[in-house]
Image: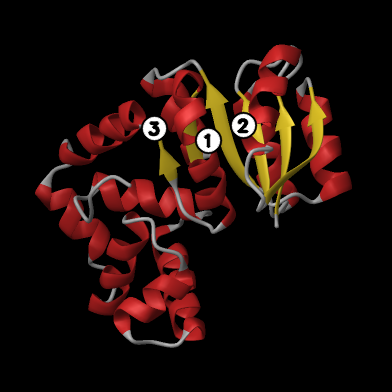
Amino acid sequence: MTTVVIVDDHPIVRAGLRAILDTVADIRVVAEGENGADALRLVNEHDPDVLALDVSLPDMNGVAVTRTLRQRGARAAILILTVHDDPQTVFGLLECGAVGYVLKDEALETLVNAVRAAACGETWLSPAVAGQVVRRAVAGSAPETAKALSALTSREVEVLRLIARGLDNTAIAQELVLTKRTVQNHVSNIYGKLNLASRSEAVLFALRHGLGDSP
C-alpha cells in the first residue's frame, strides 16, 4: 500500500485529487493540508511514501517545502502538482529534490501512475515538462559532457543511463545482471563523484549530458 499526503490550498482541488487516488486499491491518502507548514507537519507525523505538493501555497512555495524536507532527511518522494510549467519553476523544484512534476490539467489521466512511479523511486514528468528537460539536455556541449563523465567508470555510466530511463535499483540489477547491493554501491559512487543529492538530480544530470531519453 502506497501512502500519500496531499497539500494544496484549494479544497476542491484536494477533493479531486483524493477522488482520483481513491479509485485504486494500492494507494491510500492518509492526510491533507493547505499550506507549507501543514506539509512539513504531516510528513513528519505520517511518514508517507509520497507527498503530492502544490507549488503555490499561501505561506511557503513548493521549492522551500521541498528543500526543507530534503534537508531534514524525510523519505517521502515529492511529487509536484501545479499549473506552472515555466523552466525556472520546473528546474528549481527538480534540482532541490522533487522526483516528479505533474501538470494539474493532466492529473486526471496521469496522477495514479505518477504516484506509483514516485513511490518506487522513479522520476515522472508530464510530457510538456519532459520536453523542457530534453531540450536542456540537448543544449549541453560535448567537451562539458566528456569532462563531467570522466570521473565515472564504464559501469557507473551504464547505471546512470538506466537511472535516466526511470529504472529503480531492483530493475537496474535485473537489467545488468548484478545484485541490488552492487547497484546501490554504484549509485552511491555516482552521487559522490558528481556531487548529486538525489535520484532526480541524477536524472537531470544524465539527460543534460545526453545519457538517456526523457521518462
Frontmost residue, 136 versus 143 = 136
| Marker disc for residue 20 | 2
Mark yes or no: residue 76 visible.
Answer: yes
Q: Earlier in the sequence, mark 1 or mark 3?
A: 1
Which of the two discs, 1 and 2, sits closer to the camera? 2
- Which x, y percent locates residue 155? 28, 78
Name the residue tied to disc 1: 111
How many angstroms separate mark 1 from mark 2 (CA)? 8 Å
Rendered image coloring scheme: secondary structure
Which of the two discs, 1 and 3, sits closer to the camera? 1
Image: 74 above or below 183: above
Name the residue tied to disc 3: 126
Q: Quadrant of residue 211?
A: bottom left
How many angstroms separate mark 2 from mark 3 (CA)? 17 Å
SS category of the residue bearing label 1: helix
Frontmost residue, 128 versus 149 = 128
What amino acid is found at the position of numbered circle 2 in the picture? Ile
What amino acid is found at the position of numbered circle 3 in the picture? Ser
Image: 22 above or below 14: below
Mark 2 burial class by Cα count in 10 Å: few <14, some 14-19, many 20+: some
Q: Quadrant of residue 150?
A: bottom left
User: Is mark 2 in CB contact (under 8 Å) with mark 3?
Assistant: no
**Relative side of 140 to 88, left or right:** left
- Which x, y percent locates residue 24? 63, 45
Q: Earlier in the sequence, mark 2 or mark 3?
A: 2
Which of the two discs, 2 and 3, sits closer to the camera? 2
SS category of the residue bearing label 3: loop
What amino acid is found at the position of numbered circle 1 in the picture? Leu
